[in-house]
Image (cartoon, grey):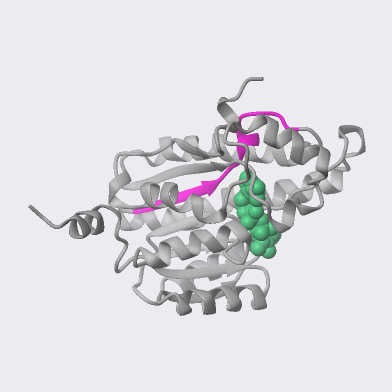
């Protein structure tokens, strides 16, 4: 019998693989990068600012991981194509893509501007569509790959004051299923992680005490998530352990989506 560590390495290990994390400088993206690096992948940190990317890549190297970085703007197809070319440099391939870039905007529905709606949709939904197309084509050509898109509890449920965001995240889950269906026999799997509530830069302004109380009431585990609590779901979805899993999602939300009163 193989040793336990060998067995786990065979199932979840990512040695020799290249993983791109878009939004990798962010709070959740950072934990996702760390998980992939510690599982053995070469991680390409991709985000809008050079400083954010550079700092994250340095952190991963401190952990003993292999990391490089490239700036990207998901609202530009040319920028995503350049990211793919950079990501291919170490091994000629990109094996894993994580779409974690996202922005939020909190207002009452009647105050939600078209500009805010368009920006959220361009980054959260169209950005995922174009990234899946650019990286998906490369992965289909290689006959293998795993894509994980980051949805939200709002992929399933309405949430007050984040209308554009909720619509974008419902779209991300639906798009994930559709692409997985389309890629069926290609060797490329596409799944979604739907996080619950994790304190992060993008929702700090939205988290009034009243909203925190409502979130705690709706979360059976009665706490926020910690970013590294997303890593287990991610490794399942991108590794050999998940090789028959496609077109689905994992909620990592302390039970928020199962709660009713
Ligand atoms: N924090 C939460 O509670 C929570 C819950 C559910 C889902 N999410 C989702 O998780 C993902 C990560 O969020 P986070 O909490 O780490 O937020 P974050 O703000 O820390 O990270 C988001 C990252 O996206 C990057 N980004 C923004 N616009 C971009 C663009 N045009 N091109 C490339 N990158 C861009 C930002 O620079 C940032 O680093 C997002 O998709 C978010 O919607 C977060």
Identify whether 222 is placed above or below 241. Answer: above
Identify whether 127 is placed above or below 33. Answer: above
Q: Position of residue 196 (x, y in %)?
A: 60, 41
Answer whether residue 153 is visible to the viewer in this image. Answer: yes
Answer whether residue 126 is visible to the viewer in this image. Answer: no
**Which one is in front, 200 or 76?**
200
Residue drawn at (58%, 50%), measured in percent from left and top? 128
Q: Position of residue 46 (x, y in %)?
A: 57, 68
**Which one is in front, 64 or 164?**
64
Residue drawn at (44%, 75%), measured in percent from left and top? 63
Magenta stretch holds residue 154: yes
Q: Position of residue 35 (x, y in %)?
A: 44, 61
Residue drawn at (28%, 50%), measured in percent from left and top? 240
Residue drawn at (51%, 43%), measured in percent from left and top? 193
* Figure quadrant of the C terminus: top right
**205 left or right, relative to 140:** right
- Kindly indicate the quadrant of the structure image that contains residue 220: top right
Quarter of the rendered image showing ligand 1: bottom right
Q: Which residue lies most toward the right here? A: 111
**142 left or right, relative to 19:** left
**141 left or right, relative to 6:** right
- Kindly indicate the quadrant of the structure image that contains residue 13: bottom left
**Which one is in front, 51 or 139?**
51
């Amino acid at each position: 019998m193989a040793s336990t560590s060998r067995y786990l390495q065979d199932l979840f290990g990512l040695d020799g693989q290249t993983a791109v994390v878009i939004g990798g400088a962010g709070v959740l993206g950072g934990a996702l990068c760390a998980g992939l690096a510690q599982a053995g992948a070469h991680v390409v940190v991709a985000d809008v600012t050079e400083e954010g990317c550079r700092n994250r890549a340095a952190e991963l190297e401190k952990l003993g991981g292999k990391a490089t970085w490239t700036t990207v703007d998901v609202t530009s197809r040319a920028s995503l194509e350049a990211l793919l070319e950079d990501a291919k440099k170490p091994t000629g391939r990109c094996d894993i893509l994580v779409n974690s870039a996202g922005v939020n905007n909190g207002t009452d529905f009647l105050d939600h501007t078209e500009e805010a709606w368009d920006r959220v949709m361009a980054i959260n939904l169209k950005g995922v569509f174009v990234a899946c197309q650019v990286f998906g084509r490369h992965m289909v050509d290689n006959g293998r790959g795993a894509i994980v898109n980051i949805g939200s509890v709002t992929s399933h449920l309405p949430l007050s004051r984040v209308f554009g965001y909720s619509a974008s995240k419902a779209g991300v889950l639906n798009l994930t299923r559709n692409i997985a269906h389309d890629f069926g026999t290609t060797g490329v799997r596409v799944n979604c992680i739907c996080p619950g509530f994790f304190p992060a830069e993008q929702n700090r302004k939205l988290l009034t005490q009243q909203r925190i109380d409502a979130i705690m009431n709706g979360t059976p585990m009665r706490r926020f998530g910690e970013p590294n609590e997303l890593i287990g779901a991610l490794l399942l979805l991108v590794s050999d352990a998940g090789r028959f899993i496609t077109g689905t999602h994992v909620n990592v939300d302390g039970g928020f989506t199962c709660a009713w009163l």
